Amino acid sequence: MKKIFLLSAIVCLFSCLITSCIKMMQEANETEKVHMITVSYKVNAVTGFVPYSGEAEPDPSFQTKGLEVNFINYQEGSSFKSVVGDNNIVTCSLTPGVYAINVAGSVTNPKGTYRLNGSSLNVPFTKDITPQDVVSNPEYTINIRPAKVGSVLFSEIYYCGVAPYYFRDQTYTIYNNGQDVFYLDGLCFAQLHPNIATTNLPSWPEDDGRENFVYGLVVWQFPGTGTEYPLQPGEAVVLAQEAINHTVNNPASFDNSMSDWECWSGNALRGNPDCPDMPYIFWWSPNKMQWLTSVFGAAFCLFRIDDAVVNKSYWEQPGHWQRVVGPSSTRYAKIPADAVLDGVELLTSMSALNMKRIPGFVDAGGTSVETTYIGKSVSRKVIGKRADGTPIYQDTNNSTNDFQVNDTPAIRRDSQKIPTWSRANAL
Amino acid sequence: MIKWIGCLVLLMSSCFAAKAQTPVTPASVDRLKMESLWLRHTNNVAGAILDNPWHYALTDFEYLIEKGEFKRVQSGNDNNAFRFNTEGGGIYEALGGGYAWGEFHYDRSVLRGAKYNASLADPLRGMPYIIADSNPSKWINQNYAMQVKLATPLIWDQLILGVGATYENGIAAKQVDPRPKVLLSELSVNPAVVWTKGRHAVGADFVYLSHREDGTASNSNYRVPQMGWEMLFPGYFMEGEISSFGSITGLRNFNANALGGGLQYGYVGPKFKIIAGGKYRQTTENATNSYTTPKRIGTTNKKEWTATAGVQFLFNDRNSLFADYKYYNRSIDGIEYIQIYNPEYESQEWIVYGKYIKSNYSTMNHNFGLDYMISKEGRSDFSWKFGVNALAEKLSDIYYLPESTQEVNNLLVKAYVKKNFAFGKGSSLLIMLEGFLNKNTNAEHNYGGYYENNIAYTQFALLDFYYLSSSYNGFTLDANYTISNIDRKRKTGLYVGASFNYVNPTSYKDYFDKRSTLVVKVGVAF
């Protein structure tokens, strides 16, 4: 009896093995050889809320015809370019794969000059998509958000730290690249979620729609009542995690003690008492040791919500924060897309562009110093000079193109000017 | 466990030795294997009964030293290996004339200067979906392999059943970041049947094989980032940092299954024996990068066709001529997946949207050999053996979009002479000298990918093409000295041997230099 049972068990086990083996082989045998496919996609410029389905009414005042569209396959390293044609439809012949669709361009209308940049990540193309398919199926639509060409932007970010494992010298420079004075009072500076570039992107509730918001981990706010901190064209302000002469702690670091504000999180043993602290107005779970952003590269944006009083209590109101779908109770600041003035996505390396985690209207690309603790910074490329010698920086809303990597960080690089009210004037 | 099984095989071999034809020497075992046409040309274990092999057992220890630059990029350029081998068996009277045979091998190799592999114990086994890095690395590999073959005696005077099985277990550890510890295991079973009537015999066999291999390339020094490539095809890859935060996760998990079978026909005439057969095997192997949320990195679908024919002409009791032909066709389709990670809390998995055959690796061989053997009456070994062998090989690889192709045709010709000096009944010296010449007759390489300046193309794919399309010549000198009857029962022999192989490339001399291999061994024969 035992022998029969043993024999039956062996026969059953062997049958299961053979069956699963045959299924695996059949799947492989049924695979077809790769061939070129032709895909069409609709490019809409939208200014209102985009529901989760992606079905949004395009804004007729922003035509996308003529914009350049780049289909990028990061896994293969390939890209295919085309131009948006009639009915806002772009058609391109490419190899099947997972693509990022990048749209770039600008339009000028009576309201001003707007960038029409946008991107849609992780789009799988496996078959032909005709223009007729596009008309009948909103799935094949990319919505881009017009962004007014602004003046205030990140001109330099030093985030990677320096060996051995020194990260207290992280520094951020914000610059007026426009022609008019910009008042920093009330401007918000956010570190976005997720903190590190990843393919495992967070899942937000469907009620938030599609790319209507970016989500902040920490939001700092410039003080002032409205006109206390003017930033003239060509002037820059410097923010630091800790504003001290770091060469005392680590000779390979640098001196950022002349920073205008410290992003101080409450550690009494840390910081420069002579440097004013910039208050954070949102931080669900503050790290009282320090405000350390990822040395692999975080993502940041500058924003201002015009029609609201933004302070600590603003972020406590329902609808102004959000949670990731799942059991986590962590809250994130819900930042409306049209409030974003500038954003930069920092990556672990440029090969991680397929791990981009913030929408294309914030930054259509990404930049990186490539590795950690090497004492390098990223800064914008100079494309011109004003009469006073201050730089004019490249700003196409695509940090892949706009930024360069520097061997060492600098305070007010490229002859940026110091605001008259800055404490740096007295140092 | 496997070490104990290996020892058991050794004991079995010793047991068979009690029935061995004496004296057992490397030369007599060489002759035995030459004359066993079913075992030499087919996978049909049941055919062993028709070969009617006498008992033998060999056990030896080997030490290998290999140096030189004429090698595949992923191979080491300064290698050492220690090996323990034992094999033995034959027709066993206690089983009523059944056949039992087994072998066990242990191999510990140290490879130095190996590049562009951070995933596999054997990067040349036909699996392209690996992680590669450019650091010259030392690998320490250990491998245990065993095989058994069993066949019944003739049932009803016309039927023979047989079964073969192999089991292999290995560990391979790279010694430089990014460093994986690769574990592998492989199991195969091979049932077979032969029906014989008079001088004719027909046979069939079936094979199932399962291969598992996995390892994670990780860094012991986190302060030095390790860049690498997620390979798809030579010259096609995704470059990135290999780490848990980087774009390339270091884990590779390979899972292969194979099914196949063969048909054989044999005929034994008064003055000749002939065997002909064909076999087919399909092996499908998946490569993924995670145990919990696996992303399908790629699949290989390998199809192998083999046709063989072998004949032995018996001119008289002393002289035999062997003629062999083998046709081999291997096609490996490389399948890549279009997939996106679904981060939604309830699912969190990679969703496959499509899959395509993106590449193909094809190999076709024609191998023809002639061997002439002169033996002395009443001895189980031979006194002279001469042979020539010609191998025409065609390699064709293609990546379909964007298209890259590679074609290599080689003709390898070998000629050897073996002389077995018998010094009475007590000792013998077997000397073999072989010369070989490889002539490349065609080599084309057209790269249409996106990374023609990347070192993973210039130093890996292109250099490997140069190696594969090289012309070269060389020789092997092999000597084995055997002292027989060293025990009281006069059944055991002791042998020592040395083999020296020298290869000299005659093309691409800017890239390659000579390579030489020395193997020394000491063993006992029962």
Image: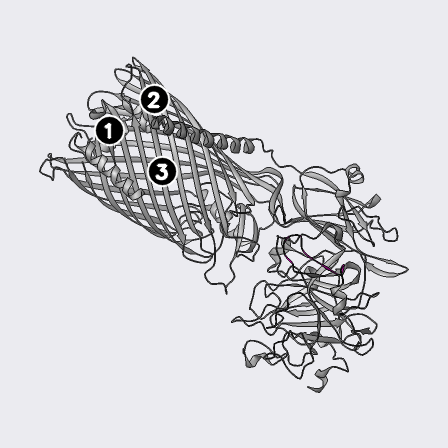
Mark 1, Cα crowd under 10 Å, few <14 / some 14-19 / many 20+, is many
Q: Amino acid at mark 1?
A: Gly
Please report, as a chain letter, where disc 2 is located: B
The outermost residue toward the right is A110
Which residue lies at the image location 25% right of the left edge and 38% below the top edge?
A: B8
Disc 3 or disc 1, which is closer to the eye? 3
Q: CA distance from mark 3 to mark 1?
A: 20 Å
Q: Which residues are magenta?
A: A318-329
Coordinates of residue A358 in the picture (x, y in percent): 69, 57
Tell me the number on the disc at residue B167: 3
Q: Which residue is mark 1?
A: B90
- Residue B336 placement: quadrant: top right
Coordinates of residue A398 in the picture (x, y in percent): 72, 59
Q: CA distance from mark 2 to mark 1?
A: 20 Å
- Is residue B341 depicted above or below A228 in this figure? above
Earlier sequence position, callout 3 versus callout 2:
3
Mark 2, Cα crowd under 10 Å, few <14 / some 14-19 / many 20+, is many
Q: Amino acid at mark 2?
A: Ile
Mark 3, Cα crowd under 10 Å, few <14 / some 14-19 / many 20+, is some
Coordinates of residue B38 in the picture (x, y in percent): 32, 25
Front-most of B474 and B210? B210
- Is residue B363 depicted above or below A184 in this figure? above
Disc 2 or disc 1, which is closer to the eye? 1
- Residue B467 placement: quadrant: top left
Q: Amino acid at mark 3?
A: Tyr
Coordinates of residue B14 in the picture (x, y in percent): 20, 36
Q: What secondary structure is the magenta-colored segment mainly?
A: loop
Tell me the number on the disc at residue B275: 2
